Image: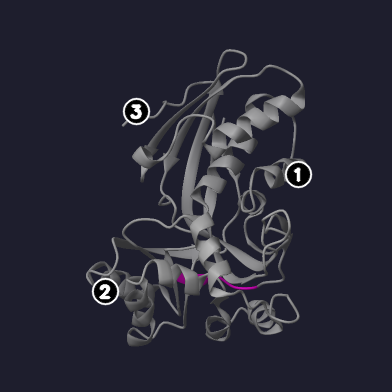
Amino acid sequence: MAEPILPGPLAVRVRAPAKINLTLRVGPARPDGFHPLATVYQAVSLYEEVIAMPAEPGVIDIRVSGEGADQVPADDRNLAHRAAALLARRTGMSLGVRLSINKSVPVAAGLAGGSADAAATLLACSVLWELDLDHEELLPLAAELGSDVPFALLGGTAVGSGRGEAVAPALARGSYHWVLAFADGGLSTPAVYRRYDELGPTPPEPFEVSAGLMNALRSGDARRLGPELINDLQAPALDLMPSLRKLVALAEEYQALGVVVSGSGPTVAFLVESEADAVDLTVALSGSGLCRSARYVTGPVQGARVLGV
């Protein structure tokens, strides 16, 4: 595993959060192959960190450390590499950067860790290259990179539409306690969508986020939010990884307020009422043998932010 690049006097350090989908409604594939989405994102306190340092013109060098680093490419297949290249291309200048990515979000877990890396890279490179671009100006570039990248910039709680890339802050109150159960292995997002198509999508009518979920968020009441958690990709994710069924079933045993597979999975998010409940459930899940590990997080949190220059 490559050692991370240590920050120097000209380094910019940025962190960006993982996300969970409180609701994810998925329509049938469009002619371009993408599925229309109606979703509500929430950013949670599990972060990716990116350090950007100057490099020779045209050079984009990436080193990855931390959770699942050996599974992450360090070339132009990496979304952070593509983010830096896109930003440099749009400036019309030959700019270079050395990126150190320190991962805490599991790979292919439905938590948008790669998208968080890309969002952090856009912000870090903007500061490093003195482009003077704010979050709003970076959002269109983020949307070109992937469905979840704009939300990783925005953070908080937000409604997503289109492919998920069109985001707007949601009217939401309160802070929520989540326990994330990380399954052994990952799920390919394209594979989950293919299975969704094979099972026969049944998008809701009207195709929108439910009023019940939005009212629960406005109230700040976790007990009201729990029953509103829904993910149309949950069924195909469970079909591809049947072991998740037992994990989801633990929600009732441990009296979680709600449970949902995050995004395309296989991470399972449990909503609980308090920090004490979260700690108890984290211990129980960690010892259940049904997941690789479990992590207590809270949400919502801020999107990509500069930690130091």
State the image coordinates of residue 206 (x, y, percent, origin top left): 76, 80
Check disc 3: other Cα within 10 Å, few if <14, some if 14-19, many if 20+. few
In primary-sequence order, the first of circles 3 and 2 is 3
Does residue 110 appear to the left or right of 137 in the view shown? Answer: left
> The residue under label 3 is which amino acid type?
Glu
Residue at position x 22%, y 69% from top?
A: 289
State the image coordinates of residue 249 (x, y, percent, origin top left): 36, 82
Residue at position x 63%, y 26% from top?
A: 128
Residue 104 on the magenta segment? no
Q: Residue furthest front?
A: 198
Residue at position x 35%, y 72% from top?
A: 242
Span colored in magenta: 173-179
In primary-sequence order, the first of circles 3 and 1 is 3
Residue at image mark 2? 284
Kindly identify which numbered label has been placed on residue 3. 3
Q: For the C terminus, give its image quadrant.
A: top right
Residue at image mark 1? 140
